[in-house]
Amino acid sequence: MENSHLPHDHGQKIEGMSERMPSEEAFQAVSEIFKQLGDGSRTRIFWLLCHCEECVINISALVGMSSPAVSHHLRQLKAGGLIVSRREGKEVYYRAADTQAARLLHRVIEEMMELACPFC
């Protein structure tokens, strides 16, 4: 999009911006990933699963939540592709997915913790 087609011409060099801008669907997909971490409990569970593989009962004990509440968050994280599970007998174990998105979100959480919490 050239400056002459914009409602206000501020003299900025933004030629071709509309052609380079990702689709609305692409932004929606990114937004859905970030929604997964819009809840502090879910972010904490995801962070934990980036560092270990654990069952619902132990995750519940580690984060101080009921098993049904943890299960709810795990379902959301799994639906979002951020965690995976494996069954061993009657027990199901969860861990962070080995994906670029999960690794990046883990790094973002770690770095944001450093910014937000000077005592960490």
Image (cartoon, grey):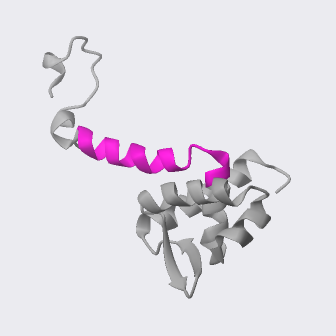
Q: Is residue 81 left or right of residue 67?
A: left
Q: Quadrant of residue 111?
A: bottom right
Q: Is residue 36 visible?
A: yes
Residue, x 78% and y 49% (percent of image)? Answer: 117
Looking at the rendering, the stretch of residues picked out in magenta corresponds to 24-42
Residue, x 49% and y 54% (percent of image)? Answer: 76
Q: Is residue 24 left or right of residue 30?
A: left
Q: Position of residue 12 (x, y in %)?
A: 29, 25
Residue, x 50% and y 59% (percent of image)? Answer: 75
- Quadrant of the rendering where the N terminus is positioned: top left
| Prevailing SS of the magenta stretch | helix
Q: Position of residue 115 (x, y in %)?
A: 71, 48
* Vertical position of residue 9 compared to residue 104: above or below: above
- Quadrant of the rendering where the C terminus is positioned: bottom right
Q: Position of residue 23 (x, y in %)?
A: 22, 41
Whether 74 is among the magenta residues is: no
State the residue lying farthest toward the right: 119
